[in-house]
């Protein structure tokens, strides 16, 4: 065993990572399944929405001029010559002194230029009496009022929400170009590990990092590929590192111990750009390239694994998928309940709880205690240029339970 000759700063590691992260190519998907994807191209509407003039109220389509002077004391009679329903328009043309019963969303008949709401008429068999005036265009939805043909309706890079999908459908699109989701091979190593779903037995423990990483990858827009635990054998690990994918995330065997094969394999067959980072936990983290794909060497301790994933792998996966590099957590600011001690030159990832509007530190150490993250509401980052934080200092808390797109 040997120590790290040098630990990179978090800033240096992120700078290298961002230089080696480019957006995945685009692919076409049905509009109906595009929610949650990132738009790869600007979308321009090929049509007007609505494509015809339509009623915005239930009532009677008529000529506005025929209502001039109408009041409840001066009723003006209009002949009802038909009706217009959504999808079943009135076929004729409306003339002076005539009206057509119309429903909201139905096409405005030829010759009409306004709609008199049903509340402002009296109905008598084949005619109605206008009880008020309407100006031309009143209660009429114009052609292209919602979306004009040729208008750019959505921009590339947008994370598509359900209402965006509805808009794409409204302009007649069946498919849309989105950024392909990065395929992420999760390589969990350790002869002491049992598959998820097993019970711990003897001196063996159950793999918790695999399910956690798969969920994190899916959260960040990637496609997790986790066929099972990889034996602590160089040949097996190298084969896993060379899987058909965009990103490889290795959990375990990332440090400098006798059984830590992955760093040597990446160094020998590719580029190990960063190995050892000045942060706590997660200091054994490594970043590199192998066969043209990014490789992340994450510590096996669960909290360190989560921390390193969020700092580095998650950032890359989001960028590859066309998303933001920023943390996917909602943030709040609150004062510390007690002092936090740190060390200059090292970034600390501090698990915390929110108690009565204040931030209660839980732990910086204890990288193997995954339960510390389930008890925590979130985490605070202590910058490397500080020796700690005093009680009452306002800090930014990243909340675990409120991921954002």
Image (cartoon, grey):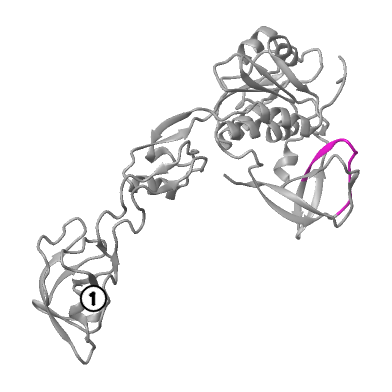
253 left or right of 68?
right
Q: Position of residue 25 (x, y in %)?
A: 50, 27
The furthest residue to the front: 150
Within 10 Å of the Cα at label 1, are there few (<14), some (14-19), or many (20+) other Cα atoms? some
Q: Indicate yes or no whether the magenta region holds residue 350.
A: yes
Quarter the N terminus occupies: top right
Quarter the C terminus occupies: top right
> Which secondary structure lies at badge 1?
helix
Q: Quadrant of residue 30?
A: top left
Asked whether residue 208 is in view, the answer is: no
Q: Indicate yes or no whether the magenta region holds residue 115.
A: no
Vertical position of residue 382 compared to residue 143: above or below: above
Residue, x 24% and y 71% (percent of image)? 114
Q: Which residues are magenta?
A: 338-351
Q: Position of residue 221 (x, y in %)?
A: 55, 35
Q: Quadrant of residue 370?
A: top right
């Amino acid at each position: 065993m040997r120590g790290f000759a040098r630990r990179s700063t978090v800033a240096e590691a992120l700078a290298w990572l961002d230089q080696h992260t480019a957006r995945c190519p685009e692919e076409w998907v049905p509009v109906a399944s595009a929610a949650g994807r990132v738009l790869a191209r600007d979308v321009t509407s090929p049509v007007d929405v609505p494509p015809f003039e339509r009623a915005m109220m239930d009532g009677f389509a008529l000529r506005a001029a025929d209502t001039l002077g109408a009041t409840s004391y001066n009723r003006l009679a209009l002949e009802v010559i038909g009706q217009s329903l959504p999808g079943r328009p009135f076929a004729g043309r409306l003339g002076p002194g005539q009206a057509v019963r119309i429903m909201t969303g139905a096409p405005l008949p030829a010759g009409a230029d306004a709609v008199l709401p049903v509340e402002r008429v009296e109905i008598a068999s084949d005619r109605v009496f206008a009880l008020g005036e309407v100006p031309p265009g009143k209660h009429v939805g114009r052609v292209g009022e919602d979306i004009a043909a040729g208008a750019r309706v959505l921009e590339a890079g947008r994370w598509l929400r359900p209402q965006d999908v509805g808009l794409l459908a409204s302009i007649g699109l069946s498919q849309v170009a989105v950024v392909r989701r990065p395929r992420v091979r999760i390589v969990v190593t350790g002869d002491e590990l049992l598959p998820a779903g097993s019970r711990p037995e003897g001196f063996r423990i159950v793999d918790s990092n695999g399910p956690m990483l798969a969920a994190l990858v899916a959260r960040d827009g990637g496609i997790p590929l986790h066929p099972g635990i990889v034996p602590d054998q160089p040949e097996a690990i190298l084969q896993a590192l060379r899987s058909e994918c965009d990103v490889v995330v290795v959990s375990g065997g990332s440090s400098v111990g006798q059984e830590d094969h992955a760093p040597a394999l990446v160094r020998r067959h590719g580029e190990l750009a960063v190995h050892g980072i000045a942060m706590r936990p997660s200091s054994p983290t490594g970043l590199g390239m192998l066969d043209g794909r990014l490789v992340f060497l994450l510590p096996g301790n669960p909290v360190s694994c989560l921390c390193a994933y969020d700092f580095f792998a998650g950032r890359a996966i989001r960028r590859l998928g066309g998303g933001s590099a920023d943390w996917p957590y909602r943030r709040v600011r609150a004062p510390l309940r007690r002092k936090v001690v740190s060390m200059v030159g090292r970034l600390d990832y501090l698990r915390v709880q929110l108690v009565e509007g204040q931030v209660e530190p839980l732990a910086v150490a204890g990288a193997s205690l995954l339960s510390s993250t389930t008890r925590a509401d979130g985490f605070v980052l202590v910058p490397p240029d500080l020796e700690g934080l005093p009680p009452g200092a306002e800090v930014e808390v990243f909340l675990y339970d409120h991921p954002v797109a």
